[in-house]
Amino acid sequence: MSAPTVVLVHGAGGVAAYWHLVQGALATRGIESIAVDLPGDDPDAGLTAYVDLIVDAAAGLEDVLLVAQSLGGFSASWAAARLPTSTLVLLNAMIPRPGETAREWWGATGSAAAMRDNDVREGRDPDGGFDMETYFLHDVPPEALEPVGERDEGDAIFVEPWGLPAWPAVPTRVLGGLADRFFPYAFQQRVARERLGLEVEPVPGGHLAALSHPDAVVDAIMSGS
């Protein structure tokens, strides 16, 4: 039986090239992949538009292993219901509930308090403010960032509700970075249990584990296929 095509969905402010190391690691194993590029800087592109783009990118595929990082959990989980998805893999991803917006998700899950508690545990100033280096790039080698661009993320994606009546009837796995400072591992464990009744599978690295530990991420993604 042939392997599914891996369809990769990046998070907020991201680009398709975020997955370049993961795609390279997949290619060395003979596994085809598609990295979807989502137009975060388009002020008119909301959640429905993102879902349509994911579905269009995977058009014609017979077996899809759909992988979502961070905010990509909102769009990929919705798209999974419209694709021949054999597995949905969430990597440090947001897990929505029916009718919930991405903006509402932060307060509903208590993510800010979880990040603050984690900062205190790890000896960082919880009132120091957010910066990319501390929360996203702390374990990412500089060379891994060279092909990766960055774009702004408009408001539209955060205000359109997640449109499914329930979690899609698709086998789902949750991967969490043990060193994630933005969505701490214990926080991800709680949210996955509360919202999906699933346990988080640990992977090394922080929020951008696909850049800091691509081979381990690919091992984890493919371990259930």
Image: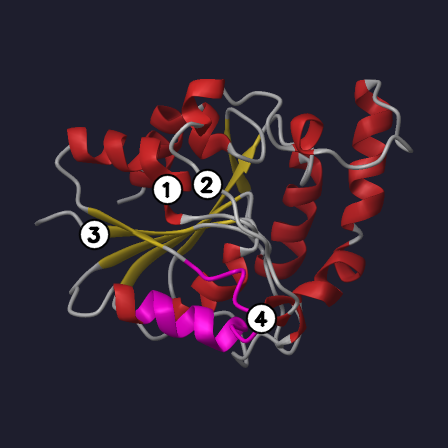
Number of residues whose C-alpha sits closer than 10 Å to that of mark 4, classed few (under 14), some (14–19) or many (20 or more) = few
Q: Secondary structure at mark 4?
A: loop
Figure check: 27 above or below 150: above
Alpha carbon separation for disc pair 4 and 1: 21 Å
Pair 3/4: label in front: 4
Residue at horizontal 73 percent and vertical 33 percent from the top: 131
Q: Is residue 45 magenta-colored?
A: yes
Question: Which mark is first along the chain, 3 or 2?
Answer: 3
Number of residues whose C-alpha sits closer than 10 Å to that of mark 2, classed few (under 14), some (14–19) or many (20 or more) = few
State yes or no: discs 2 and 3 in contact (Cβ < 8 Å): no
Question: Which mark is first along the chain, 1 or 4?
Answer: 1
Amino acid bearing label 1: Ala
Amino acid bearing label 4: Pro
**Is residue 169 among the parts visible in the rendering?**
no
Residue at horizontal 52 percent and vertical 50 percent from the top: 11
Residue tagged by mark 1?
A: 17
State yes or no: discs 2 and 1 in contact (Cβ < 8 Å): yes
Residue tagged by mark 4?
A: 43
Alpha carbon separation for disc pair 3 and 4: 30 Å
Bounds of the magenta span?
38-55
Number of residues whose C-alpha sits closer than 10 Å to that of mark 1, classed few (under 14), some (14–19) or many (20 or more) = some
Figure check: 184 above or below 44: above
Q: Secondary structure at mark 3?
A: strand
Residue tagged by mark 2?
A: 149
Residue tagged by mark 3?
A: 5
Question: Which mark is first along the chain, 3 or 1?
Answer: 3
Give coordinates of residue 137: x percent, y percent: 59, 27
Alpha carbon separation for disc pair 1 and 3: 17 Å
Amino acid bearing label 3: Thr
